[in-house]
Image: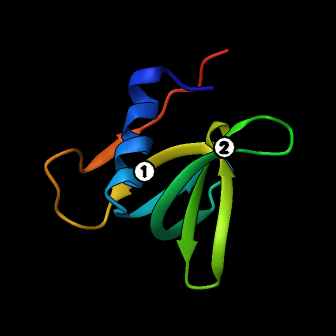
Amino acid sequence: MMSCSQYDYIEIACLYHLPVRLKLLNGAIVEGTAVDTTYTTERKEAIVIATSSGHETLPTESLQSMQALAANPHFDQVTFTQIA
């Protein structure tokens, strides 16, 4: 789980459908357009990303960082700190 202030950046990315690059804790990179927030079947917070291969739902607890791929007044890059 991440702090509310960090989660706000995910909501902003989704609200403005920003193109983003997500780096996951396992080292994987996912690029696409932030679409929405949701919950997984395990009731964990997640972000929905529209990628070239379709929509991916990624639990927010798996995120290490998010980089905006388009100029915007809200953020360039956010590094997430997972809390217990």
Give coordinates of residue 69: x percent, y percent.
30, 67
* Residue lying at the far bottom of the rendered structure: 52
Binning the other alpha carbons within 10 Å of mark 1 as few (below 14), some (14 to 19) or many (20 upward) gives many
Q: How is the image coloured?
A: rainbow
Q: Which mark is residue 47?
A: none
> Which residue is at a point 23% across and 67% down the rendered structure image?
70
Q: CA distance from mark 2 to mark 1?
A: 11 Å
Q: Position of residue 81 (x, y in %)?
A: 51, 27
State which quadrant residue 51 falls in: bottom right
Q: Is residue 2 above or below residue 56?
A: above
Q: Secondary structure at mark 2?
A: helix
Amino acid at pointer 2: Ser
Please rate how many residues cluster around mark 2, counting C-alpha atoms within 10 Å: few if below 14, some from 14 to 19, many from 20: some
Report the front residue among 78 and 59.
Answer: 59
Question: Residue at left 66%, top 43%?
Answer: 62
Q: Are marks 2 and 1 in contact (CB under 8 Å)?
A: no
Relative depth, front residue between 54 and 75: 54
Q: Is residue 69 left or right of residue 3?
A: left
For badge 1, the amino acid type reads Met
Query: Which residue appears at 63% of the width and 26% of the height?
Result: 1
Q: Which mark is residue 62?
A: 2
65 left or right of 72? right
| Figure quadrant of the C terminus | top right
Q: Kindly give the residue lying farthest to the top in the view shown.
A: 84
Q: Which labelled disc corresponds to residue 66?
A: 1
Q: Of helix, strand and loop, which one carries label 1?
A: strand
Q: Is residue 46 above or below residue 81?
A: below
User: Which residue appears farthest toward the right when viewing the image?
Assistant: 42
Residue nearest the observer in this picture, 75 or 55? 55
Q: Position of residue 4 (x, y in %)?
A: 46, 22
